[in-house]
């Protein structure tokens, strides 16, 4: 019995080496980016609760665009990984074209929101907050400048996702590390006014991000031109779109976008409700907690990328039985890894007084409570993300749309509205109640995975 269990849920050393070879560089990249982001938050936090709150509120809106682009890359990546496994270069180039076409369609919307109507959008995030006026004044300045970063950030997202999907992850680590450290240095220069420059505070943070993102974009382009990966578009005939394949990708993309956007829109709405529970201390406290939590959220990207690449490659080869066996082993590995990251998360609580000592005591208390709660839920959160990654690897985006749509609309949104209107619960308690929905997601997603709708070779 024990041998059967081990064989079903645990792989060989070579299997785990292949998993870690993909997951660890991606996690290292995300961890370093999160560390630098933490330093950025530390620098902005030094300006006080209100200015940190303004940057955070603007960041919530900018995150919507980031999720939209990532959803497009994820949908195209389903096909990219499988075409890579099938050694179909034409299909890989079509996947890259698909990503670029849809991603650039979203840039216009992003720039209009950032530069045309930033005040109107940000005001939705701080309704009933007693410091709303001051927070909006800061947030609109930051958001306007960040509008210029739309193009380089989109190109970086598309190219980096394509490299991850073919398992070429080490260059991502090097380029991203250099760019994020550059961003940190420029933050220090522009925010506080070093080397004879004026102190630009919040505007300086946005300018630093734009410059670093532009240099990162150039580095990706140079690497791809020299490396010549199989998805590289280098001939005129490569730019012609295969209409039938594009439609196939678009169908799955729309489901992925719906699934991801309903999560992030509901999350943004929830944040607005959290912000109504106090003043700038609540906004800055919640923002700083997620800056800390991002250190162990790196597990999501590593696990999802490894599952997508390994299962996608196996499915692209047409070895469905092997993919079925790998699925069980990858999910078990994700659960165990989530437990480890939960312990890591608990340790990060000690960083809060060091990094966010400039915030008020109330903001620091909220931050500590949130980080503790998130760390407790890490095993569940990592496992749910792994289940989603398995479904995406085989193109089963309908199941994801069903799970996210049902649980988010019927449970989370209804629950958060009820607790906001009829209770006096604080933002941390409200967030933790919402996280309990992940237990239901695990059960529903598990049932759908057993139906094996994800077990498909999309390149056939």
Image: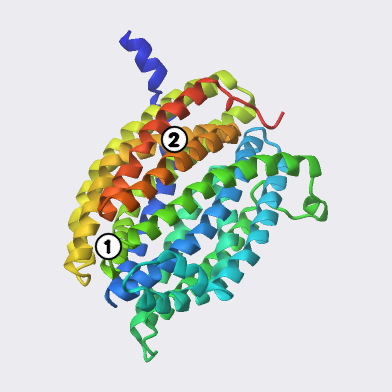
Looking at the picture, how far across and down is residue 139, in whole percent? 43, 74
**Colour convention:** rainbow
Residue sitting farthest toward the top: 1
Q: Is residue 283 left or right of residue 156?
A: left
Q: Which residue is mark 2?
A: 386
Q: Residue at x 44, y 48 (%)?
A: 26
Label placed on residue 285: 1
Q: Nearer the viewer, residue 168 or 120?
A: 120
Report the side of 260 relative to 350 (left or right): right
Count neighbours of disc 2 (C-alpha within 10 A) and say few if under 14, some if 14 to 19, many if 20 or more.
many
Q: Above or below — where is 131 with respect to 295?
A: below
Based on the displayed image, in which of its 4 quarters is residue 117 positioned?
bottom right
Residue drawn at x 71%, y 51% is 97
Task: Please state the horizontal and vertical placement of residue 22, each as a whole percent of the image.
Answer: 46, 41
* CB-based contact (under 8 Å), mark 2 and mark 1: no
Which residue ends up furthest to the front in the rendered image? Answer: 422
Residue drawn 25% across the image and 41% down it: 376
Point out the image quarter for the N terminus.
top left
């Amino acid at each position: 019995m024990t041998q059967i269990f081990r064989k079903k849920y645990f792989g060989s050393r070579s299997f785990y080496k292949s998993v870690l070879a993909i997951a660890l560089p991606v996690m290292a990249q995300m961890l370093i980016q999160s560390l630098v982001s933490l330093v950025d938050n530390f620098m902005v936090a030094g300006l006080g609760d209100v200015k940190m709150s303004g940057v955070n509120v603007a960041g919530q809106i900018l995150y919507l665009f980031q999720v939209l682009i990532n959803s497009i890359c994820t949908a195209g990546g389903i096909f990219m990984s499988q075409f890579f496994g099938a050694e179909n270069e034409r299909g890989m180039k079509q996947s890259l074209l698909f990503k670029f076409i849809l991603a650039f369609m979203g840039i216009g919307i992003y720039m209009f929101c950032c530069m045309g109507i930033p005040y109107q959008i940000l005001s939705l995030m701080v309704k009933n907050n007693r410091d709303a006026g001051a927070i909006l004044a800061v947030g609109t300045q930051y958001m306007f400048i960040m509008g210029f970063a739309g193009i380089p950030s989109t190109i970086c997202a598309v190219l980096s996702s394509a490299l991850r999907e073919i398992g070429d992850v080490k260059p991502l680590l090097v380029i991203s590390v250099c760019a994020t450290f550059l961003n940190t240095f420029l933050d220090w220069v522009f925010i506080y006014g070093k080397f004879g420059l004026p102190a630009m505070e919040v505007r300086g943070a946005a300018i630093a991000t734009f410059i670093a993102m532009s240099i990162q974009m150039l580095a990706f382009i140079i690497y791809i031109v020299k490396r010549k990966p199989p998805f590289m578009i280098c001939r005129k005939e490569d730019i012609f779109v295969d209409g039938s394949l594009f439609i196939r990708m678009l169908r799955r993309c729309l489901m992925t976008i719906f699934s991801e956007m309903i999560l992030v829109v509901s999350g943004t709405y929830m944040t607005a409700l959290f912000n109504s529970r106090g003043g700038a201390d609540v906004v800055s406290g919640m923002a700083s907690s997620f800056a800390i939590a991002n250190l162990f959220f790196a597990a999501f990207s590593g696990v999802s990328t490894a599952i997508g690449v390994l299962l996608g490659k196996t499915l692209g080869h047409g070895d469905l039985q092997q993919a079925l066996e790998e699925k069980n082993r990858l999910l078990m590995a994700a659960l165990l890894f989530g437990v480890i990251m939960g312990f890591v998360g608990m340790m990060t609580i000690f960083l809060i007084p060091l990094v966010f000592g400039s915030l008020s005591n109330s903001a620091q208390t909220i931050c500590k409570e949130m980080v503790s709660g998130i760390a407790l839920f890490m095993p569940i959160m990592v496992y749910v993300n792994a289940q989603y990654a398995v479904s995406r690897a085989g193109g089963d985006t309908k199941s994801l749309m069903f799970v996210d749509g049902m649980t988010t609309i019927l449970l989370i949104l209804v629950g958060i509205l009820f607790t906001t209107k009829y209770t006096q619960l604080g933002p941390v308690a409200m967030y933790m109640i919402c996280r309990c929905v992940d237990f239901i997601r695990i059960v529903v997603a598990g049932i759908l995975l057993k139906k094996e709708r994800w077990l498909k070779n999309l390149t056939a």
